[in-house]
Amino acid sequence: MVRCPWGDSTPDYAEYHDTEWGVELHGTNALYERMSLEAFQSGLSWITILRKRPAFRAAFVEFDPKLVAEFGPADVERLMADAGIVRNRLKIDATIHNARTIVEDDVDLDALLWSFAPKKHRRPATITDVPAITDESKAMAKELKRRGFKFLGPTTCYALMQATGMVDDHISTCFRATPRA
């Protein structure tokens, strides 16, 4: 079975590649989780985040923005002491802040994020053809920043778009590459 090259590097990556990456994902909680994990990944390897995902889910109460929005200073200290997650205060604060933004501004995260999905997207032939940012990811990052979201630049937004199926960047030889209509 031919996968995108990164999907063949470890069993964890193979499972993620084969079952999740590039699959359309909807719903505020699910998208808030992915948005948060992509922000935590910034500067790190995705495998680190993937392997810590169960601990992240426990620490951030299954990424329910209504619950995370209620986190206070004691929760931040609890998270900073949790070796199961990435203990970066700026990323933890941003994750809590972003939950508050979703809740307080009654953001329909699904509609907001998916509004940036490109109408047309060219399938990459090789891994070197996969962009790190696009005009759509720049626009998404700009709008999220305007709304007060933190730690979500154009590169993180493009990774989010890839992970949640807003774009399909499985290379042309990958078994997961969906045919274009």
Image (cartoon, helix red, strand yellow):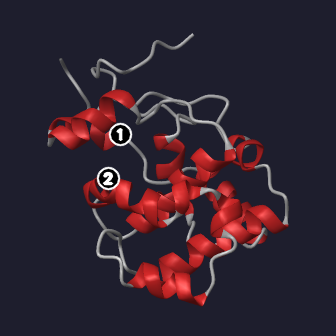
Label 2 amino acid? Leu
Q: Nearer the viewer, mark 2 or mark 1?
A: 2
The residue depicted at 29 percent of the width and 43 percent of the height is: 128
Residue 35 location, quadrant: bottom right
User: In 3D space, how far apart are the residues under numbered discs 2 and 1 (Cα atoms)?
Assistant: 24 Å
Q: Which is more toward the observer, 149 or 53?
A: 53
Query: Which x, y percent locates residue 123?
Result: 44, 27
In this rendered view, identify the residue nearer to me: 21 or 3: 21
**Crowd around label 2: few <14 · some 14–19 · many ≥20 (10 Å):** some
Q: Is residue 90 above or below residue 104?
A: below
Residue depicted at x 47% and y 88%: 77
Left or right, 146 with respect to 171, comes to right
Residue under label 2: 50
Judge whether 98 appears above or below 32 on screen: below
Marks 2 and 1, the one that precedes in the sequence: 2
| Relative horizontal placement of residue 114, taking residue 164 as reference (left or right) | right
Q: What is the quadrant of the C terminus in the image?
A: top right
In percent of the image, x 71 and y 61: which residue is there?
66
Percent coordinates x, y for residue 74 in the rendering: 55, 88
Q: Is residue 4 above or below residue 137?
A: above
Residue 138 x %, y %:
62, 58
Q: Using the rendered image of the protein, determine whether residue 170 is visible from the camera's viewpoint.
A: no
How crowded pointer 1 is (Cα within 10 Å; few <14, some 14-19, many 20+) is rated as few
Q: Does residue 3 appear to the left or right of 164 in the view shown?
A: left
**Which secondary structure lies at badge 1?**
helix
Q: Helix, strand, or loop for circle 2?
A: helix
Residue 141 lies in quadrant: bottom right
* Mark linked to residue 129: 1
